[in-house]
């Protein structure tokens, strides 16, 4: 700006001869040409009065490559033209109404260094004198990017330069709404007198520009004064810096002239600077900061700094320096310490990281008079940052500084540094694991003047179990930079780098690299090797391959002729791979090959061998590619792929490259019964590719795959405008899934015709057809918008479900746009199948609004639940509105006239009528069913529709018949509740009353229908195997794992049967009653209570023994425990028969008092005499009785008669006198029992038992002889 304004009067000197020229056309162009340059462009607008004493310019702007950075508006130059004739530039006024400095200009760099000699100071000796009475800018605007905040001010100044004398006065005042600021400067200098006078007074209020830019805490008001007057041979300037009215730094700077052109200098400044920094740094600075320095500079440029001393509370830095005129040091010494008696010190660094140290020491020394050696020592303890902590670190350096000699005309510098760090703790865990807690390094360097190089002959880094050792040379420092070097890196344990790499690395690795590179030319020549031992990456196959020793060898060169890959070799396990060749614009020839001799090194699932070769020759404009790979007996652990790859498999390819076109001459894949080939052209203007697949026999894949498949495909055009057609034919296809195999029987044909147009894919037609199934789809895909029209028909659903023969169709559309998917699908078929789905699904499948309605047959599920079966009609009317969760599902599902059967259950459910209303994630169910054995069950309550499926159900049993033909039959009445999670934990409770119940003590041989041990089925047909599996005759291995029996459910069931529980079989006919309670869990049933004797007898060979005891109770499962005792007394001997044990296998024993052998006891029971007195016929009867009690005799005649008459009790007995009587009994109601007895004389008697409560009974009788009786009895079991 100064250059522009001051140059104006001088530029006008030669213009007087051109007075008639137009101002703009000549003067403006001339000035712009003179003032522009050095990356700046000056534009002048509105130049008037150039030849008068008052010239004006409307605007001057200066721009650089980024645009205008300075604008001056309404410039006035009031000057004296006549003074030019006297050699004077006399300007009364040079002003601008407005100066706008928007930003700083782009700096131009000058790489040349200043000469070492001092040039001295003097004002320029101009050919004319300059006297400017007024320099002013009414409005000075500075952009925010310059000072951090916008600035507006007013500038006034004057300037005089004449005869080697100069003087100026300047005032700058801030005028905007920002903090007040003012700068006043008065300065003068005379060349003859040598007197320099400076008076600077700068002040700024709080929050000003200077304190804000400096980051002073609180941005306080500041003042700066610099005052001094005197000759430069003896000049002293007083400097004072204050904030908030208090002096912070003060002192003086002196300059003195010495002998022989020397200039001495001295500086002495001190003060309390701590308030100008953050409070945290107050400990470092203290309240007494001092800076002192003195020295001299000789006329030839030699610099001597005799003393330098800088001190704060926590730091001292002192030293001296002598630099020769050529810039080389003659002597230096520097010592420094940081520390506060072992307390941490916060360093005032500009980084955002808080950095503390406990102590630091620095020593540097060199004295050419004592030799050419230099030393350096740095010690640091207690470094503490958020990202790193360090207990201690040391740097020790030694070396030489050698001046030029006759033998060695260039100066030189060399050095060696030893660096050690201990107690290193990095905040990043991965980096900390990689580096470790201690590290050491050694560095050597060498510089020789005139060699244009910088050498690092030694670079060493050593960690706990890793290191690097190398050397580096940088050459051509002033021309084309070239780097030469070599190095070896090793890692004895790669696991320390696992976290850093994000892979579970293990093993040992060593890498060697040597070569050179011309950084500016881009050329290089490098050779390297990497050796690994037992490397691991966390990928099982790679780890197996890299077990043991693995190597990689590389040699590559790049120059102006191209890139030469001399070798790239890889060896690991049984794998070797190599590549070599040249890459160049004029022609390349590169080849690679792989030889994998045994893939089993990858793991147990792998096997075989693989080898191949690939080659490229030519240029990208005219080249060729070939590929040839062969595998022998390859296996990868996937049964289908292993079967396909059995034997020899090959992949070959040949292609020609011509510019942007690739002609695929041949691509072939051959494996077992599979042949795949492709050929065609790939080009920017259009592709034409075709492929053929022939899979002659899918059975090689193993499993259930069968049949043959042939396919052809062709693509023409470009991805923006192309066509894809494909056809496939399958014959007798099968995949091993019976239902799918039935659908694929015969010949299956697939055709597809697609068109590509820009981002749109038109599905012109896709069809699938075979004798059973026909499907067709059309539509288009364009960006996020897709629409598919679908029609499919199954000729006969009976192929899958024989009970539902007939045609099944599905038709509708699916549309996708930016908001999601619109569905409209409907299916119809036999079994009243008629279902539809309509509505929208969000694009992220997060929400939906769907209507799902229709009807179907439950039997459709039979194929999936076999051997269980279900039948009946289903109707559903559902809404899904919200997230794709059952909580958003509402509506109604009904199941009518249903039937469910399971071979594992003793009954089937028939006549099922069930309704479920869904809302808020729960289903309210209500329904009823008939049991196939008789009786009814009703249910109502709620079931949660998400795990654990919490339920609150009530089941009502009405005369529900449960039977095991071999063991029991009963009728159940009562209520059962299920509360809790159905996946486990639901509590099962309630009260069940047993109506007439009969428990049969079976004959032996109850398991006669069981399978034969060790029976093996040879060549068993699949349907027979499935039948045996459904019958439960084949063990399910999947259930043999840990022995778990599935989820457990708490129990609290009460089973009540006051009477009419009969125990029959093996001559036994007893009635019991009582109550049971089942507690515990379904995994561990804890029963309590028992059924006790009401009445009963044991019949053996016409001998009736009255039961004195009968007990039935549960002991952990549902095979009841029996304890029955019948006795008879004869000749003073009491003989008893005892039946005890599980109902399925009770044991019979005979006891007496006094004790007799069992056969003697039985003889006395049956015949009333000892065993020795029995006749042969009686002995046979005795044997028959034993068989009956042991379960070998089947039902006796009395049992058969009782069943035939439909009685609850039937008995023929003989008394002690030999009189015979017949007795018959039956329950005529639940609590009323009647019994009729007729003797051999025809006299009859009737008795009646009425149970009023569980313990009170009314009994009455009447006989033909006129005798009657009645009584009330209270009975209690103990």
Image: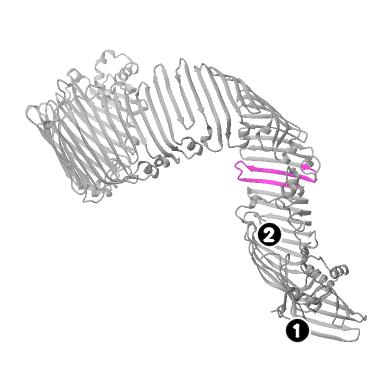
Q: Secondary structure at mark 1?
A: loop
Q: Position of residue 944 (x, y in %)?
A: 65, 56
Which label was assigned to residue 1260? none
Viewer-closest of 844 and 297: 844
- Answer yes or no: is residue 1208 visible: no
Instruction: Using the rendered view, name the quadrant where residue 1069 is placed.
Output: bottom right
The answer to which of 1175 and 324 lies nearer the viewer is: 1175
Find residue 962 and report its horizontal and vertical position in percent.
Answer: 77, 63
Quadrant of residue 549 within the rendered picture: top left
Q: Is residue 1036 visible?
A: yes
Query: Which one is in front in this view, the residue at disc 1 or the one at disc 2?
Result: 1
Question: What residue would you read off at disc 2?
Answer: 942
> Which image quarter holds the N terminus?
top left
Q: Nearer the viewer, residue 195 or 750?
A: 750
Label 2 SS: strand
From what the image shows, is residue 894 above or below residue 527?
A: below
Q: Residues within 10 Å of mark 1 (few under 14, many from 20)?
A: few
Question: Closer to the N terminus: mark 1 or mark 2?
Answer: 2
Question: Quick one: label 2, few (<14), some, or many (20+) residues within 10 Å?
Answer: many
Overall secondary structure of the magenta stretch? strand
**How is this picture coloured?**
one colour
Q: Which residues are magenta?
A: 828-854
772 left or right of 20 in image: right
Residue 1155 in the image: x percent, y percent?
70, 78
Check disc 1 and report the residue beneath it.
Answer: 1132
Instruction: Please tell me in which quadrant of the rendered image residue 117 appears.
Output: top left
Asked if residue 746 lies in the magenta stretch, the reply is no
């Amino acid at each position: 700006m100064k250059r522009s304004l001051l140059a104006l009067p001088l530029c006008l000197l030669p213009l007087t001869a051109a007075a008639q020229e137009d101002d703009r056309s000549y003067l403006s162009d001339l000035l712009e040409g003179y003032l522009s340059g050095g990356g700046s462009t000056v534009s002048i607008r509105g130049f008037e009065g150039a030849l008068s004493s008052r010239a004006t310019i409307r605007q001057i702007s200066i721009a650089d490559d980024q645009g205008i950075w300075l604008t001056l508006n309404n410039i006035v130059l009031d000057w004296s033209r006549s003074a030019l004739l006297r050699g004077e530039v006399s300007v009364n006024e040079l002003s601008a109404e407005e100066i706008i400095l928007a930003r700083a200009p782009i700096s131009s760099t000058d790489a040349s260094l200043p000469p070492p000699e001092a040039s001295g100071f003097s004002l320029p000796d101009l050919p004319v004198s300059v006297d400017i009475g007024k320099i002013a800018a009414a409005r000075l605007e500075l952009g925010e990017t310059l000072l951090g905040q916008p600035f507006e001010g007013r500038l006034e100044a004057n300037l005089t330069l004449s005869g080697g004398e100069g003087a100026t006065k300047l005032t700058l005042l801030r005028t905007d709404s920002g903090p007040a600021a003012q700068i006043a400067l008065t300065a003068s200098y005379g060349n003859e007198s040598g007197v320099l006078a400076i008076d600077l007074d700068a002040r700024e209020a709080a929050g000003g520009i200077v304190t804000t830019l400096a980051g002073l805490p609180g941005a306080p008001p500041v003042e700066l004064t610099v005052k001094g007057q005197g000759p430069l041979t003896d000049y002293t300037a007083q400097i004072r810096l204050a904030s908030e009215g208090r002096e912070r730094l003060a002192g003086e700077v002196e300059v003195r002239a010495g002998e022989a052109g020397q200039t001495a200098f001295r500086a002495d400044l001190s003060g309390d600077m701590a308030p100008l920094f953050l409070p945290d740094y107050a400990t470092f600075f203290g309240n007494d900061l001092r800076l002192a320095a003195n020295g001299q500079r000789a006329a030839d440029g030699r610099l001597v700094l005799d003393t330098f001393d800088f001190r704060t509370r926590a730091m001292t830095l002192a030293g001296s320096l002598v630099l020769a005129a050529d810039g080389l040091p003659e002597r230096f010494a520097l010592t420094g310490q940081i520390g506060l008696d072992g307390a941490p010190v916060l360093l005032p660094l500009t980084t955002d990281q808080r950095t503390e140290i406990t102590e630091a020491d620095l020593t540097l020394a060199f004295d050419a008079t004592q030799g050419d050696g230099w030393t350096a020592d740095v010690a640091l303890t207690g470094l503490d940052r958020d990202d790193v902590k360090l207990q201690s670190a040391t740097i020790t350096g030694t070396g030489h500084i050698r001046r030029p000699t006759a033998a060695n005309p260039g100066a030189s510098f060399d050095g060696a540094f030893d660096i050690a760090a201990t107690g290193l703790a990095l905040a990043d865990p991965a980096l900390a694991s990689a580096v470790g807690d201690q590290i050491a390094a050694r560095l050597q360097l060498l510089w020789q003047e005139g060699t244009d190089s910088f050498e690092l002959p030694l670079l060493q880094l050593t960690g706990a179990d890793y290191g690097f050792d190398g050397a580096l040379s940088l050459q051509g420092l002033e021309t084309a930079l070239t780097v030469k070097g070599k190095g070896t890196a090793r890692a004895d344990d790669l696991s320390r780098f696992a976290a850093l790499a994000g892979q579970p690395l293990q093993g040992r690795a060593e890498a060697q690299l040597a070569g050179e590179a011309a950084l500016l030319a881009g050329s290089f020549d490098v050779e390297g090797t990497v050796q690994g031992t037992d490397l691991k990456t966390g990928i099982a196959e790679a780890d197996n391959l890299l077990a043991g020793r693995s190597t990689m060898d590389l040699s590559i060169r790049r120059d102006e002729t191209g890139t030469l890959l001399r070798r790239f070799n890889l060896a690991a396990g049984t794998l070797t791979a190599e590549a070599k060749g040249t890459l160049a614009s004029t022609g390349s020839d590169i080849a690679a090959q792989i030889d994998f001799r045994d893939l089993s090194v990858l793991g147990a699932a792998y096997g075989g061998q693989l080898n191949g070769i690939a080659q490229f020759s030519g240029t990208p404009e005219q080249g060729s590619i070939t590929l040839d790979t062969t595998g022998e007996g390859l296996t990868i652990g996937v049964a289908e792929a292993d079967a396909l790859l059995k034997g020899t498999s090959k992949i070959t390819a040949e292609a020609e490259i011509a510019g942007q076109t690739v002609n695929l001459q041949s691509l072939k894949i051959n494996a077992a019964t599979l042949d795949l080939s492709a050929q065609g052209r790939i080009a920017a203007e259009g592709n034409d590719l075709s492929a053929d697949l022939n899979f002659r026999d899918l059975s090689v894949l193993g499993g259930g795959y069968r049949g043959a498949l042939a396919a052809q495909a062709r693509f023409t055009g470009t991805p923006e405008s192309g066509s894809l057609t494909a056809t496939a034919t399958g014959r007798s296809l099968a995949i091993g899934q019976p239902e799918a195999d039935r659908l694929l029987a015969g010949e299956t044909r697939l055709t597809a015709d697609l068109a590509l147009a820009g981002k749109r894919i038109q599905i012109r037609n896709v069809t699938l057809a075979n004798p059973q199934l026909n499907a067709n789809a059309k539509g288009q895909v364009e960006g996020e918008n897709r629409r598919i029209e679908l029609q499919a028909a199954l000729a006969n659903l009976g192929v899958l479900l024989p009970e539902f023969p007939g045609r099944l169709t599905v038709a509708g559309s699916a549309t996708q746009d930016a908001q999601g998917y619109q569905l409209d699908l409907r299916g119809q078929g036999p079994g009243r199948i008629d279902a539809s789905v309509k509505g929208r699904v969000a694009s992220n499948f997060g929400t939906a609004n769907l209507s799902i309605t229709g009807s179907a047959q439950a039997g459709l599920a039979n194929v999936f639940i076999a051997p269980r079966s279900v039948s009946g009609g289903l109707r559903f009317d559902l809404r899904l509105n919200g997230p794709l969760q059952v909580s958003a599902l509402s509506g109604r599902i009904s199941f009518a006239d249903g039937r469910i059967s399971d071979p594992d259950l003793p009954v089937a459910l028939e006549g099922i009528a069930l309704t479920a209303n869904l809302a808020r994630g729960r289903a309210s169910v209500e329904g009823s069913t008939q049991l196939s054995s008789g009786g009814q069950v009703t249910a109502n309550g709620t079931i949660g529709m998400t795990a654990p499926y919490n339920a609150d159900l009530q089941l009502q049993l009405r005369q529900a018949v449960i039977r095991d033909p071999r063991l029991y039959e009963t009728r159940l009445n009562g209520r059962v509740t299920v509360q809790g999670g159905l996946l486990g934990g639901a509590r099962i409770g309630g009260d069940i009353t047993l109506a007439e119940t009969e428990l049969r003590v079976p004959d032996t041989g109850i398991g006669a229908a069981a399978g034969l041990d060790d029976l093996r089925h040879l060549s068993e047909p699949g349907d027979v195997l499935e039948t045996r599996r459904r019958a439960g005759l084949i063990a399910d291995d999947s259930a043999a794992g840990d022995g778990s029996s599935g989820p457990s459910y708490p129990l609290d069931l009460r089973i009540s049967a006051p009477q009419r529980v009969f125990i029959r079989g093996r001559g036994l006919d007893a009635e019991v009653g009582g109550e049971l309670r089942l507690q515990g869990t379904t995994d561990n049933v804890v029963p309590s209570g028992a059924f006790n004797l009401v009445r009963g007898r044991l019949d053996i060979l016409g001998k009736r023994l009255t039961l004195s005891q009968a007990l039935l109770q549960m002991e952990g499962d549902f095979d009841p425990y029996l304890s029955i005792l019948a006795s008879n007394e004869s000749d003073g001997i009491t003989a008893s028969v005892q039946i005890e044990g599980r109902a399925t296998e009770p044991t019979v024993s005979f006891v007496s008092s006094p004790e007799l052998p069992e056969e003697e006891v039985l003889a006395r029971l049956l015949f009333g005499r000892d065993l020795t007195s029995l006749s042969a016929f009686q002995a046979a009867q005795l044997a028959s009785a034993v068989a009956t009690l042991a379960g070998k005799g089947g039902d006796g005649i009395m049992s058969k008669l009782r069943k035939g008459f439909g009685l609850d009790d039937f008995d023929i007995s003989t008394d002690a006198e030999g009189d015979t009587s017949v007795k018959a009994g039956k329950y005529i109601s639940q609590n009323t029992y009647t019994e009729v007895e007729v003797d051999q004389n025809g006299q009859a008697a009737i008795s009646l038992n009425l149970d009023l409560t569980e313990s009170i009974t009314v009994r009455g009788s009447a006989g033909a002889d006129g005798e009657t009786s009645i009584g009330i009895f209270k009975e209690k079991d103990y």
